[in-house]
Image (cartoon, rainbow, N blue to C red):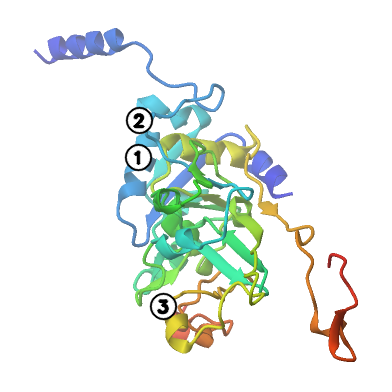
Amino acid sequence: MLKDLCRRMFGRSLWVYHANSGGCNGCDIEVLNVLTPYYDVERFGIKLVGSPRHADVMLCQGAAMRSTARALRRAYEAIPEPKLVFAIGSCACGGGIWHDSYSVIGPVEKIVPVNYYIPGCPPRPEAIIYGVAVAVGLVDKKTAPVQFKQAEFPIPRYHPSDLKSDGEVVVYEKLDRV
Amino acid sequence: MSLLSKVKEALVCLRAGRVTLPYPAAPRPVAGNFRGRPIFDAAKCIGCGGCAANCPAREILIHDVCQEIRVLRYVGRRCTYCGRCADVCPEKAITMSTDFETATDAIGDIGQTIELFMSTCQRCGRCFKEPSPLERLKQKGYRFDDLAHDRWVFGSRAYLDTERAVDDIRIEMD
C-alpha cells in the first residue's frame, strides 16, 4: 500500500531535505555525491531543497542524539504530508557504533517514523540510488531475512525423566532422537 | 573576456562527454577491495562466538537456548562492514560479500539467524560449565543476549529488562 502511494504521490519528483542529527559527515558526502553528474539523480526528479517545508522526503543521517532529537522531530513535523523518511547509514538505521553511549538515543526511528532504510557505513552512492529506486518502484528490493534452523539433534539426547532404575542398573528407556 | 571564458568552459564540457552512469538500469561493479554485507555460512560455523566478541558495533548476538542449541543472530542494522568478524572466524564461515544493494523498507530484512547444534562433552554431557559471575562478566561459556529486542547484554543478566538503560532520562518532545 505504501509503495502504491509512493508511486502515485511521488511519481514525478522527490524533493529531499537533508537532515543530519549527529553523524560524522560521511553519509552527507555520499548524498552530495549522488547529486553530482556521475550519479545524476535529477534524472529521477530528485532535488535537494534547503527547507523542510518545501520537501517531500527527509534524508536522516546520523543517530538521534539527546541534543538534536527535538530539532529532528520539529523538522519532520514541518514537512507537509505525504512524507517519506529515509534513514541513510548505519547510524540512522541502528544507532551507530556509539549506540550505547550516554548522548546517543539510538536509531532515528525512535524519534521519527522511518519508511526506508539504507544501511552502510557510509552507503555507496549507488546504494543510496538503489534505495530511492526501491522507494519509487523502479527496482525490487533484494534483501530478505535469512534463518537457518536446527531441524533435529544429530546425536541422541538423554533426559533425566527417561532414567529408570532397574535394581542396581540404571536404564535409559528412550534412545530415539529428540 | 568573459565570453571567451564561457566558450572555453563549453569546450571543456563538450570534451568530457556524457559521464552519468546508468546505474539502476545497468549493474555497477564494485572495486576489488570493497566490503559489503557479511554472509554467514551455517554449515561451517562452530559457534565459538569469536565474531560476537570482536564485533565493534555489537551486532552479532548469541543466545544459548539450552545446553546444545546456540542461536547466533546477525542484526546488521549498525554494521559498518569492518570485516573483523570475517577476520577472526577460525573456520572462515563469514565472508564479506560485495553486496551493497541492501536498501529495504523493513529493517529486519538484513538480519541473519543461525541455530547451531553445540556438540557436548562426551564425559560430562555438557558444552560448558555453568558460569561463575566472574566468568559471566568475561563473556565465556554461556551467553544471554536479548534476541527479542535485538539487544546485546553485557556480561550478566542484570540488563535483561525490556527498557534500555539509556532511557533513564526522558527527552521532552513538543
CA–CA distance between discs 2 and 1?
Answer: 7 Å
Q: Residue placed at 44% from the left, 22% from the top? A: B21
Q: Is residue A50 left or right of residue B96?
A: left
Q: Nearer the viewer, mark 3 or mark 2?
A: 3
Q: What secondary structure is marked by label 2?
A: loop
Q: Is residue A37 left or right of residue B133?
A: left
**Label number found at residue B138:** 3
Residue A144 locus on image (x, y percent): 66, 47
Say which quadrant the C terminus of chain A sits in: bottom right
Mark 2 lies on residue:
A36
State if disc 1 and disc 2 touch (CB < 8 Å): yes
Could you tell me which chain the residue with mark 1 belongs to?
A
Residue B130 locus on image (x, y percent): 56, 83
Residue A59 locus on image (x, y percent): 45, 51
Q: Amino acid at mark 1?
A: Leu
**Label number found at residue A32:** 1
Q: Nearer the viewer, residue B101 or A46?
A: B101
CA–CA distance between discs 3 and 2?
Answer: 49 Å
Could you tell me which chain the residue with mark 2 belongs to?
A
- Farthest-out residue, left: B1
